[in-house]
Image (spheres, rainbow, N blue to C red):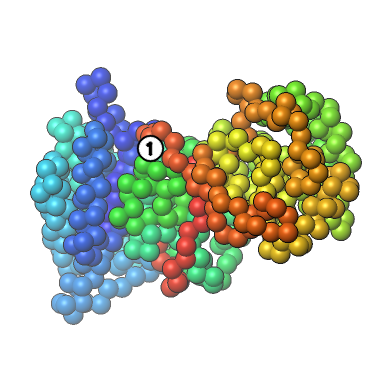
Amino acid sequence: MRAAIISADDRHYHRRNGEMQPSEQIGGMPMPTQDQLDDLALSLSFLYRVGLYPVVLHGAGPQLNEILEAEGVTPDYISGIRITDAKALQIARRVFAEENLRLVTALEKLGTRARPIVTGVFTADYLDREKYGLVGRITRVDKRPIEAAITAGALPILTSLAWSNEGQLLNVNADVAAGELAKELEPLKIVYLNDKGGLYHGVTGQKLDVINMDEEYDSLMKESWVKYGTKLRLREIKELLDHLPRTSSVAIISANSLQKELFTDSGAGTLIRRGYKLFKHSSIDAVGPDRLRQVIHDRDPEVISGNQSVAGVLNDLKQTPYTIYGDEPFEVVAIVSHPEGEVPIMTKLLPSRNGILNNVVDNVFQAIKKDHRKLFWTARADNENRAWHFERADGSFTRAGRSLFWYGIQDVKEVEAVIKSFESNKRLERAYLPVGPSPPPHRVSAAPAGAREYHTSARRPSLASGSLAGIHTGSSRGYAQPPPLQNKSGLLLSELVASPAKPASRSSTLTRR
C-alpha cells in the first residue's frame, strides 16, 4: 500500500474561526507490514489530536502485484507505468478498497475518525490506451469530498483511482495522483515515504541530507547510479517543485519518522527543494558592491557593534586573495581569504534568518568545503547557536569569549604551526588565537541586541589537551536545542528506487526545515 498525506499553505488542515483550513501533504508510501501501518496510524492520530487534519492518499502496488502473480498474471511496466487491463483493474479496485479499509480501521482503533474516499476526487483521460491500457492522466481534482470529510471532523483517506468523463474507472500511479493533488493545494512541504527513510548515494552509500534542485539537478541526473525509478522520481519531484511556490519542499522519510519530520528542526531523511543557484566570485564588483555593503552593514556583528566599519571590512578584504560565496538572493554571504601557499580563513559568514531556517548556510558551507580541504574560521563564544560551528569543525579553541574552529587538520602540531603563521602574518585578530595575553575584559563584549551570527544553542564541548592548551580536536560535537514549535505545511510521501546502500549516519543539519 502506498500512502500519502496532503495539505497546503503553512498549516495542516485545522479549524480556524469555525472553518477548516488546509495545510500539509504526504504522498505515496509502501506499507507492506502491519508494524509500518501502525506507525503511520499513530503519527496521523497524533496530528489529529493536536487539531491537524492530514489528507491521506494511497495506492496498492505491492499488494496488487502479489495477487496478480498468485493468479498467474505477470505485472508489466513501461517506463515505470503499470500496464493495466480489465482483469488487473478489477483486482486493483478490490485491493485498493481493502487497503483503504485497513488504514481507516487502524485509525479508528486509535480513536481517530477517518473517512474512506475510494473515488470521486480525480477525473482522468486515458494516458495512452493502446500502450498502457486502463491507465489515467488526471485532468481535474475535486476538493469537495476532502473538505466535507474534514468539516465532519474526519481524516480523508483517498485512493488514486479516477473516473473518466465517460464513466470508465482508470488506474493512476499514486505518486502522480499525490503530485496533482499537491499542485491543487500548493503545500509548503511534500513528503515521500520509503522503507530506507531517505535517498542514498548509489556509490558511497551515504544518505543525501539535502538536494537543491536549481543547483544540483542537472549534475545529479548525470550520475551513473541515478537511473530507472530514481531518475523518474527525481524528475517528477523537480516538475512538482517548479510548479509550487519556491518555499515548498519535498522530504523523503520512513513512516515512523513522520512526527520527527514535522516537529523537529533536524527533520528526517532527505530534504529536496528548489533552492537557489550558488555563486562564487573573486571580486567585489562581480558580486555587486552596493549589495555586499548592505549585507555587511545589516548582518556583520562587528560592524553593528562598532568594532569595525563597512569600509574597513572591504579594505581588509583587499589585502589578500579572496573568494565571496553566496546564493542568488543573498540570503547567505561568506568570504574566504586564501593567500597562495597558506591555509584559508573564512573571515565572514553572514546569513539572514531565512538563510538559516532554509539551510542555505549549509549549502554555501558545502561549496566552500569543495574548494578548500582545510579551513579556519571564528565565532563569538556567546553565540546561542554556536553548536553549528562545533558540528562542522574537526577542532576548536575557545579563549576569552572567542572561538577558533577548523576542519581538515587532525594533527595538533600542524594546528599549532598554522596558528603561529596566522599570528606572524596578522591574518586573525589576536583575541582569537591561543597565544599571548588575553584581551582586556572591556574588549570582550557580546554582540548588541539584534546582531546575530549563525549559531544554535549548544552545550560547551569538553576540551582536549594538546600542545596548545585548550585546543579541542576529534569528533565530539555540541548539540542544538529545537526552536519553539512551528506549524509545518504540505507534505508528499512516495517510494524511491535507489541502489542498495549500507546504513550511514546522518550528518546533523540544524534548522533545515
Q: Secondary structure at mark 1?
A: loop
Tell me the residue at 76%/38% (across/down): 438
Please say if 79 is above or below 142: below
Tell me the residue at 13%/47% (across/down): 110
* Residue 229 screen position, x and y as percent: 42, 66
Image check: 19 left or right of 378?
A: left
* Residue 463 screen position, x and y as percent: 60, 52
Image check: 395 left or right of 114?
A: right
Residue 158 is at least partly visible in this image? no
Q: Which residue is under mark 1?
A: 488
Image check: 236 left or right of 337?
A: left
* Residue 94 screen position, x and y as percent: 13, 61
**Mark 1: amino acid:** Lys
Nearest the viewer among 319 and 498 is: 319
Tell me the residue at 88%/48% (across/down): 424
Tell me the residue at 36%/48% (across/down): 260
Q: How packed is label 1: few (under 14 Cα within 10 Å), some, or many (20 or more)?
A: many
Q: Residue furthest top?
A: 17
